[in-house]
Image: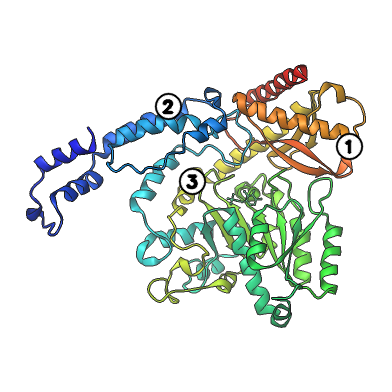
Amino acid sequence: MNLKERNMNVNINAVSDSEVGLAGTNQESSSLTETLFGADTLSIRQRVEASRSTFLNSTDATDDMPIENIRDKFMALDIPSQGSNVDAYLDKLDQDVLPHCSHLASPRYMGHMTSPIPSFLPEIGRLVQTLNQNVVKMETSRSLTFLERQVIGMLHREIFRFDHEFYQSHLQSISEALGIFTSGGTLANIGALWTAWRRAQDRHPAQMQQSVGTLNKPVIIGSELLHYSFDKGAHLLGAHLHKVPVNDRFQIDLDALREAIEQFRQAGQPIICIVAIAGTTDYGSVDDLRAICELAHDVEAHVHVDAAWGGGLILSERNRSLLDGIELADTVTIDGHKQLMLPLGCGLLFFRDPTFSQATVHHAPYAVRATSYDQGRFTLEGSRPVNALYLHAALHIIGKQGYDDLYTESLGRARYMAQAIDARAEFELIAPPSMNILAYRYIPQAYRGKPLDEQDNNHISQFNIALQKAQRQKGDSFVSRTFRPIKRYQNQSLALLRAVLLNPLTKHDDIDFLLNDQIQIARSLEAAG
Ligand SMILES: *Cc1c(COP(=O)(O)O)cnc(C)c1O
């Protein structure tokens, strides 16, 4: 039934407009309203379910369409003047869109930081969208503002471990926040830099006054492996981002960090923030959080820990020691949509001292009021969905023990893959897993078992890029790739294959499959010259 037929049906059955008091609306628009808001959602759900299961039961291997051809399907600009019914629309999605999505949940898809999400979460998602509460302010969310603050508090306590009284007085305090929800790690990191900037203005007003607007910009320091959200944040604030080299375990080099700090201090440039990474995007490596936090406190700089990737491990009794020292940070970013396995849109920024939340407060007289519970005072973003419900549900349904098991298995998978790489002469392991990410590369036959010079390495890099692309195109398994300077090769930048072993559905067999798939593809590339 198309919309027109539906409209006619509705018209036949509907009581007349005047009877239901729709004064001023004509017949046609009232039946549209019926179609939009009174629709038979059960049949729509069944139809969507069919599309969902087709997607879930297919793999990337079933879609070998080149990316340019996919792009060409999305060139039409005409907005239909007549709407269609939902079935016809979903047919279109089945045809043109869903077959060309990434199968991020596939157990042989070990390339990116997005995991399959537990099956109860899309259903919670229906609730989130049905309630459609706006947690920017109390009036549009009520209980859910308190729930959001509560789950932020739950994780805050896992990170910072303050006592009962602390949480009783701060958890639902009207004037401050223990943390904020954001759309992702990027916004959380930018929020942290903004907080650091405002704190520096409060703590060192004269120095900041001098430096703003001159070439003597305020400085943010972190390692060369900083996520590019810090480039964005530094640019927004007009700050200088200084990147320090890493050691051979891909952690910030502490001597180089001390030198950099000293250099900027002597030059009179204010250091507003020092960033430590707990789980680098490239390798999953964790900086020495304790040492960096202590250094930062010594020089009165705000210290931020970007635990977007690694932060989830705070829930894991057996693995939280990987994050030792995180409790000394001023602010911490965690991405719920990575290791906590929540849907996208679940970034979190935590303030060790809740008064830090006041550094960036803004309000508006019409809505987000100064004395209220309105979270919009503390967030860079405005209107926001209550994604906190996903976290709330996951913490209750999975529980700490569940997360502990999931992480322990995930780290075990990464160790297994490292051994499987070492056991195959075709590969070189570049970064053994410090968490559940590892980097390696394929060494073509001609280069095996001999010292490699710069030119050799360039050839090998080109080969690995071709290999990663061919594997992606073949679609049976997937790893991503990165390009980074590597110490053992005199800091030459190398193309590396990067495996992320978060997916709980990935078994040792899948890892073996992926490596063998790679060897086969590589051999045919080598044979083709
Ligand atoms: C993913 C990631 C980010 C950015 O998070 P988004 O949610 O993609 O905005 C920042 N830092 C690190 C270390 C990350 O892994």
**Helix, strand or loop status at disc 3:** helix
Residue type at the position of mark 1: Glu
* Residue displayed at 37% across by 45% down: 126
Residue type at the position of mark 2: Thr
In the shown orientation, is residue 6 left or right of residue 67?
A: left
In the depicted view, which residue is nearer to us: 415 or 88?
88
Residue 454 has which mark?
Answer: 1
Q: Earlier in the sequence, mark 3 or mark 2?
A: 2
The residue sitting at the bottom extreme is 206
* Residue displayed at 84% across by 49% down: 247
The residue sitting at the right extreme is 451
- Residue at the disc numbered 3: 394
* Residue displayed at 64% across by 61% down: 233
Quadrant holding the C terminus: top right
In the shown orientation, is residue 374 left or right of residue 184?
A: left
Report the mark closest to the observer, 3 or 1.
1
- Residue at the disc numbered 2: 54
Q: Is residue 101 visible?
A: no
Q: Position of residue 427 (x, y in %)?
A: 79, 27
